[in-house]
Image: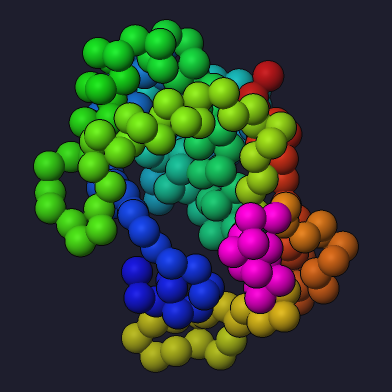
């Protein structure tokens, strides 16, 4: 939390820590699974992911393979982040199919997602339910997803590996917009990255919904 606050200038009021087991158990509480979609085959030997082109609904184990995959499409961690963003949007859409309107199912899902571990500034199950009530009518068209603008690769660090250099000017603009509760800057307003797949390109939530 201190690292995020120091680098973004944004206060962290609450956070949610989710381990792999809790992630799978939460997805399994969504009847019929969550849709994921791809225009070409995705195969990652590290996670076991093996998806054919099209849309498929996945349950806990396969969902974890999907959101953890970074070797299936050649886009490294940037591709993994985009998969996770799409998964969030499609999960929220699935929650409208009988979960948000069923207090018992919603409470059970929130409790599974939250878990029982104590955490400083950790969000509570009650706060998750309040958040769900406030955001239940939020349309994906009014959501924006992006990665932090990056300039390129730093030199490798011994014992750590490759690291990225933020585009400090672009990142400051993004987090300044968030602090002021304003829309994210457009893609062309931030200089392109030296890493083509890492170039800053905000996406509307509606563009990430699987057909």
Q: Quadrant of residue 124?
A: top left
Q: Is residue 52 visible?
A: no
Is 118 one of the magenta-colored residues?
A: no
Is 181 one of the magenta-colored residues?
A: yes
| Dominant secondary structure of the residues highlighted in magenta in the image | helix
* Colouring mode (rainbow / by chain / secondary structure / one colour): rainbow
Q: Which residues are magenta?
A: 171-182
**Residue 82 x, y percent position in the rendering:** 60, 47
Name the residue located 65 percent from the left edge and 31 percent from the top edge.
140
> Is residue 25 depicted above or below 191 in this figure?
above
Residue 31 left/right relative to 55: left
Q: Is residue 9 visible?
A: yes
**Residue 19 x, y percent position in the rendering:** 25, 47
Indicate the quadrant containing the N terminus: top left, top right, bottom left or bottom right: bottom left
Which residue, as the protein is rendered here, is positioned at the far right?
188
Give 93 or 194, whichever is nearer the viewer. 93
Q: Quadrant of residue 141?
A: top right
> Is residue 165 depicted above or below 203 in this figure?
below
């Amino acid at each position: 939390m201190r690292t995020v606050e120091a680098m973004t200038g944004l206060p962290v009021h609450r956070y949610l820590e989710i381990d792999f087991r809790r992630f799978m158990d939460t997805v399994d509480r969504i009847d019929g699974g969550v849709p994921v979609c791809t225009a070409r085959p995705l195969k990652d030997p590290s996670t076991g992911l093996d998806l054919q082109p099209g849309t498929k609904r996945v349950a806990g184990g396969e969902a974890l393979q999907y959101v953890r995959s970074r070797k299936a499409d050649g886009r490294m961690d940037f591709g993994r982040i985009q998969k996770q963003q799409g998964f969030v949007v499609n999960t929220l859409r699935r929650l409208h199919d009988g979960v948000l309107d069923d207090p018992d199912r919603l409470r059970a899902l929130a409790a599974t997602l939250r878990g029982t571990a104590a955490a400083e500034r950790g969000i509570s199950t009650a706060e998750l339910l309040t958040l769900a009530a406030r955001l239940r009518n939020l349309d994906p068209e009014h959501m924006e997803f992006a990665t932090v603008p990056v300039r390129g690769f730093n030199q490798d660090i011994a014992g750590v590996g490759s690291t990225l250099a933020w585009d400090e000017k672009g990142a400051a603009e993004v987090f300044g917009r968030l602090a002021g509760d304003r829309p994210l800057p457009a893609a062309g307003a931030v200089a392109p990255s030296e890493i083509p797949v890492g170039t800053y390109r905000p996406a509307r939530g509606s563009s990430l919904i699987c057909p």
